Image: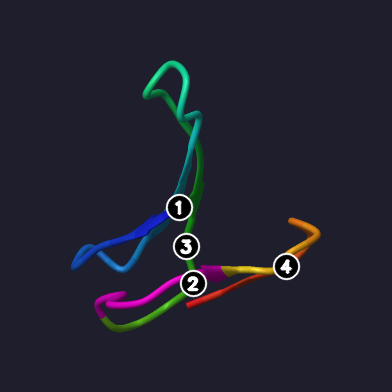
Amino acid sequence: MTGASDHRVRLWDVRTGEALSDLEGTTEAVYSVALSADGCRAAS
């Protein structure tokens, strides 16, 4: 999972390098992301 200055959080397939999801909704650049241990929640 990555965050960027374009206000998006992206979820990636680490095997293929393909972006799986673009999550929008923030109004500022995303400098930090976290995923819960069970993989069900994300925070930015």
Q: What element carries label 2?
A: loop
Question: Which residue is painted at 50% across and 29% down in the image?
Answer: 13
Q: Which of the marked residues, 4 or 1, is nearer the chain's N terminus? A: 1
Tell me how far mark 4 sits from mark 1, CA to CA: 12 Å
- Residue type, mark 1 in image: Met
Q: Position of residue 34 (x, y in %)?
A: 53, 71
- Residue type, mark 2 in image: Gly
Task: Report the residue marked by disc 4.
Answer: 41
Task: Report the residue marked by disc 2.
Answer: 25
Q: Is mark 3 on a helix, strand or loop?
A: loop
Label of residue 23 in the image: none
Nearer to us: label 1 or label 2 = 1
Task: Report the residue marked by disc 1.
Answer: 1
The residue stretch that appears in magenta? 29-34
* Residue 38 inside the magenta-drawn segment: no
Nearer to us: label 4 or label 2 = 4
Instruction: Name the foreground residue: 10 vs 24.
Output: 10
Q: Position of residue 27 (x, y in %)?
A: 35, 82
- Against 3, residue 43 (above or below) is below
- Residue type, mark 3 in image: Glu
